[in-house]
């Protein structure tokens, strides 16, 4: 009986396959949820060769699998990493092959402080390379400013702290408040505009750029480049007092000096009136002591001058005596000058006599006679030396002369034909005609016989 019943029941069931179930669940999920914004922390990030990204998005209590396809992740400006806090826009879906619920990411950006910190570091590096943080551009603060300017919100706690501090330290310094919003949309441009206005008005010796504490987003107006450029271009020294001691902004790096708080900034630019009062008292004491010493010195000097002041009659006598002395010196000088001129005149006269034509002519005549005598003597000496030399040369010539040899019985024999001197018997032949020169006369002979000593 139960068998037919079970067969009918089975035939009436709508049995799903796993694929069909996953497909229909996917349709329900994708059709039930629109695009949503979701914030969480990245983990298990994978980048396969296909270019798609697969990762897990989690918070403190749960996690969800995500996929971001290549055509969408190419538009992401940040570089995702594990542990990064991100804000995504996604649609809900289901991966049918594994039956896993997942998010299909359409857009991704850094979320919260992470994005702001990255933007902060990028701008900091850019401005540092541009030289906006260079200590060479930092200007010194005035020790006693004639007027202090404060750029801040007129309704914030910072202005109250600054007013209280300035009133306590030095209430005599005038204060100019440049009201400006320090938070919200467009606040950075307004702060920069107010800094430029304060610089153009140039009515203060120093400016305070102040704001109370807050989160990184609350302080972000002071991390904008437009504010940094305005601070750098401002002709007036600027002290930044933004947030609390742990808060650091780009404006702090560009400012001429940074204070950890608005109160510290007010203390930095304002002198301590009690300290200045004590200093003035010390200067007053030193000035009084110096004046008393100078007065005593002047009085002593005056007494000394009075003691040195001579009687008028004595003074006249001194001047008369000095006048007589000058007259004597003048007369002596005139006489000395006259003697000097006379001596110079005599010297010139003597020099003129030396150059007189008659005396010069006499000297020339004497010089001419002297030269003639010296010439005659020199010629005689020269003639004697030449004669002696000729005799010596004649004697030397006579010593080597062939005639002297001939006079001693020798003869010179030459051939009659070619006039060659005959030195050896074998140089001639029988029948040759010879000429023999004697000491007196010559002989012409014919050779009839030749005798050679070597044959004897």
Image (spheres, helix red, strand yellow):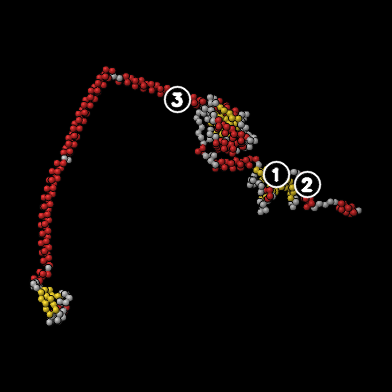
Query: Mark 2 and mark 3 in contact (Cβ < 8 Å)?
Result: no
Q: SS at mark 1?
A: strand
Q: Is residue 126 above or below residue 379?
A: above
Answer above or below: position of 254 versus 165.
below
Q: CA distance from mark 1 to mark 2?
A: 19 Å
- Residue at image position (11%, 77%) is 444
Frontmost of labels 1 and 2 is 1
| Disc 2 secondary structure class | helix
- Give the spatial CA distance, label 3 vs label 1: 71 Å
Dots 1, 2 in contact, CB < 8 A: no
Q: What is the tally of numbered marks visible in this picture? A: 3
Q: Residue at x 11, y 75 (%)?
A: 436
Q: Give the Cα separation between the discs numbered 3 and 2.
A: 89 Å
Which quadrant would residue 353 be assigned to in this image?
top left
Q: Is residue 428 above or below residue 277?
A: below
- The residue wearing badge 2 is 28
10 Å crowding of disc 1: few (<14), some (14-19), many (20+): some
Residue picked out by circle 3: 283
């Amino acid at each position: 009986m139960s068998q037919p019943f079970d067969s009918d029941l089975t035939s009436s069931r709508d049995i799903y396959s796993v694929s069909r179930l996953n497909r229909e669940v996917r349709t329900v999920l994708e059709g039930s949820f629109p695009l949503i914004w979701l914030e969480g922390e990245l983990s298990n990030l994978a980048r396969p060769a296909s270019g798609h990204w697969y990762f897990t998005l989690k918070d403190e209590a749960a996690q969800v699998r995500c996929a971001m396809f290549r055509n969408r992740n190419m538009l992401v400006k940040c570089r995702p990493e594990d542990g990064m806090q991100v804000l995504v826009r996604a649609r809900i879906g289901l991966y049918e092959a594994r039956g896993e619920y997942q998010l299909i990411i359409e857009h991704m950006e850094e979320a919260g402080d992470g994005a702001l910190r990255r933007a902060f570091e990028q701008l900091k590096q850019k401005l540092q390379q541009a030289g906006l943080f260079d200590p060479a551009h930092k200007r010194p603060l005035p020790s006693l400013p004639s007027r202090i300017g404060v750029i801040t919100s007129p309704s914030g706690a910072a202005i109250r702290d600054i007013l209280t501090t300035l009133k306590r330290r030095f209430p005599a310094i005038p204060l100019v408040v440049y009201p400006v919003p320090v938070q919200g949309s467009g606040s950075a441009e307004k702060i920069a505009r107010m800094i430029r206005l304060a610089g153009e008005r140039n009515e203060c010796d120093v400016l305070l750029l102040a704001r109370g504490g807050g989160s990184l987003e609350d302080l972000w107006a002071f991390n904008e480049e437009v504010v940094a450029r305005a601070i750098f271009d401002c002709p007036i020294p600027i002290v930044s007092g933004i947030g609390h001691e742990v808060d650091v902004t780009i404006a702090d790096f560009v400012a001429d000096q940074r204070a950890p708080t608005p109160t510290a900034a007010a203390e930095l630019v304002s002198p301590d009136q009690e300290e200045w009062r004590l200093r003035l008292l010390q200067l007053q004491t030193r000035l009084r002591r110096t004046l008393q010493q100078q007065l005593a010195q002047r009085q002593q000097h005056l007494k000394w001058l009075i003691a040195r002041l001579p009687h008028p009659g004595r003074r006249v006598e001194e001047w008369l005596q000095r006048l007589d002395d000058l007259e004597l010196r003048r007369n002596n000088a005139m006489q000395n000058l006259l003697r000097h001129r006379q001596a110079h005149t005599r010297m010139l006269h003597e020099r003129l006599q030396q150059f007189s034509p008659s005396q010069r002519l006499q000297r020339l005549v004497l010089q001419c006679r002297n030269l003639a005598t010296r010439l005659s003597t020199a010629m005689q000496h020269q003639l004697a030396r030449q004669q002696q030399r000729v005799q010596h040369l004649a004697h030397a010539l006579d010593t080597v002369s062939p005639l002297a040899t001939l006079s001693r019985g020798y003869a010179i024999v030459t051939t009659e034909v070619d006039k060659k001197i005959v030195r050896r018997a074998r140089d001639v032949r029988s029948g040759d005609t010879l000429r023999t020169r004697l000491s007196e006369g010559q002989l012409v002979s014919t050779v009839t016989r030749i005798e050679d000593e070597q044959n004897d």
